[in-house]
Amino acid sequence: MELTKRQNEIIDAAVRLIARRGIQELTIKNLAAEIGVTEPALYRHFANKAEIVRTMIARFDEGSPAANSRKKGFNAIRAFFEARVEQLLAEPALANVMFCEEYFISDPEFSEQMTAMMHRHKAWMEARLAEGVASGRIRSGIPSVTLFRLIVGPVRMLFKQWGMSGMKFDLRAESGRLLDALELLLKP
Amino acid sequence: MELTKRQNEIIDAAVRLIARRGIQELTIKNLAAEIGVTEPALYRHFANKAEIVRTMIARFDEGSPAANSRKKGFNAIRAFFEARVEQLLAEPALANVMFCEEYFISDPEFSEQMTAMMHRHKAWMEARLAEGVASGRIRSGIPSVTLFRLIVGPVRMLFKQWGMSGMKFDLRAESGRLLDALELLLKP
DNA sequence: CAGAGATTAGTTTGCGTTCACTAACCCTAT
DNA sequence: ATAGGGTTAGTGAACGCAAACTAATCTCTG
C-alpha cells in the first residue's frame, strides 16, 4: 500500500478522531478541521469517505505483527500478541479503533474487508494451536474452536478495556499476566 | 420500569431493526415503518430517540438473569451464563444488540448507563470467583481481574460470533463446551 | 365530547459531495 | 532568464439528501 505524505496525515487524523470522540464523530468536516484544511481538500487525496475508512482498516491490518516467525505453538501465539501490545503502546489511539469493529462489520461497505482480516487471523491461530497440541505443550481434548475463543476472547477484552479506560493501566504487565495464566491453564 | 403496550412494541421493533440492519439503520423513520405507523406517532410514546435507546438498554439489563441464586462459585457463574443463553435463544435479535455496545459506550448520552451496568456485572462475578477460590474449586494464584477476563472474554466472544453468524450454530451446545472447558481449566 | 393516538406537511440541521476558481509550484522551449 | 502550459493542493459556496423533530389537524373510542 503506497500512500502519500498527506494521505498518511489524513489517516492519522482519522485514527486520532475516532480515539478521542468515537466513530460517529469521524465526519469529513471534523477530519478536515483536525488537519486544518477545508473539507473539499480531502477529496484531492481520497475519492470519498469510504476510501478513507478502507485505507485506515488496511493500514491497521498491515501494521499487524509478522506471522512468519520461527516460533511454534503457544510461543508463536504469545509472540503475536506481544507484538500487538507493542503496536498499541506505540499508537494507543488504535485501541479505540478496535471498538468500531462491529460498526465496520455491520456496514456492508466494509464487512468483507473486516471478515477477511479476521478469518486470516483465525486460520493462522488455529494452525499454531494444532502445533501446540501435537507437541504436547497444549492439552488435548478441547475443540479447536473452543480453544480459539478461550485465548482470543480474553486478549481482545483486555485490549478493549485498556482503550476504554483511557490507557490508564499497564498494558504490558497486564497482558503478560494474562498470557502467563493462559499458558499455565492450557498446559496438559 | 412500567411500559405501555405500544412502548414495548416500539422497543421490540428497535431490537429487531438493529438485529437485521445494524445500529445505523435504527432511525425514527425505519422504526415507524417497522410498526406500520408514521414518524411523529412515535413521539406520542417517547420524548425523543435517546429515550427509546435508553429504554431499550434498560430493558435488556432488566431481562438479565437473576443473580440472586442459591449457587456459589463457578456454579453460579455457569448458571448465570446458561440463563443468558436461554435469553438469547428466546430472543435472538438481542445478540446483535450486543454488537452496539461500543457505540453506546462511546456516546456520552448512554455511556454512564452502560458502564454502570457493566460494573455491576463485574462486581457480582468477582464475588463468585472469590467464593470459588475460597472453597478450593477454582485454582488460586491468578489475579481476580485476569480470572474475570479469562471467563467473560470467551463467553462474550461466543455470543458475538453467534449473532454475526446469523445464529447458524448451536449456541447451547457450544456454550456448554466452553463452560466445560473453563471449569476444567480452572480446577486446581 | 374530550382526549389519546395517529396523520400530513412541514422545519432545521448536518452530512457527504461537487463546483468553479486560484495561488504556488514545476517543467520546458525560446 | 523567462514566458507559457500543466499540475498540485487548496478555497468558498452551494447542492441533494436524510436525519430528528414539530405544529396543526384529523379520527376514533370511552
Image (cartoon, coloured by chain):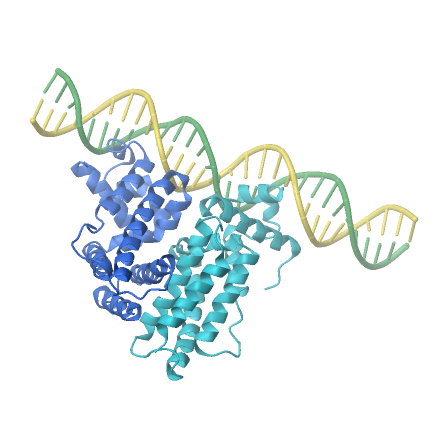
Chain colours: A cyan, B blue, C green, D yellow
How many numbered marks, from 0 up? 0
Quarter of the figure with the N terminus of chain B:
top left
Give the x, y percent position of residue A40.
59, 44
Quarter of the figure with the C terminus of chain B:
bottom left
Residue plotted at (20% across, 56% down): B83
Residue plotted at (50% across, 48% down): A19
Give the x, y percent position of residue B140.
33, 64
In the image, taking residue B118 as reference, residue A165 lies left or right, namely right
Give the x, y percent position of residue B79.
20, 59
Residue plotted at (37% across, 78% down): A138
Against B10, residue B157 (above or below) is below
Give the x, y percent position of residue A131.
41, 81
In the image, taking residue B119 as reference, residue A14 lies left or right, namely right
Residue D12 picture quarter: top right
Against D28, residue B92 (above or below) is below
Q: Nearer the viewer, residue A58 or B1?
A: B1
Residue B164 picture quarter: bottom left
In the image, taking residue A77 as reference, residue A41 lies left or right, namely right
Q: Nearer the viewer, residue C17 or B52?
A: B52
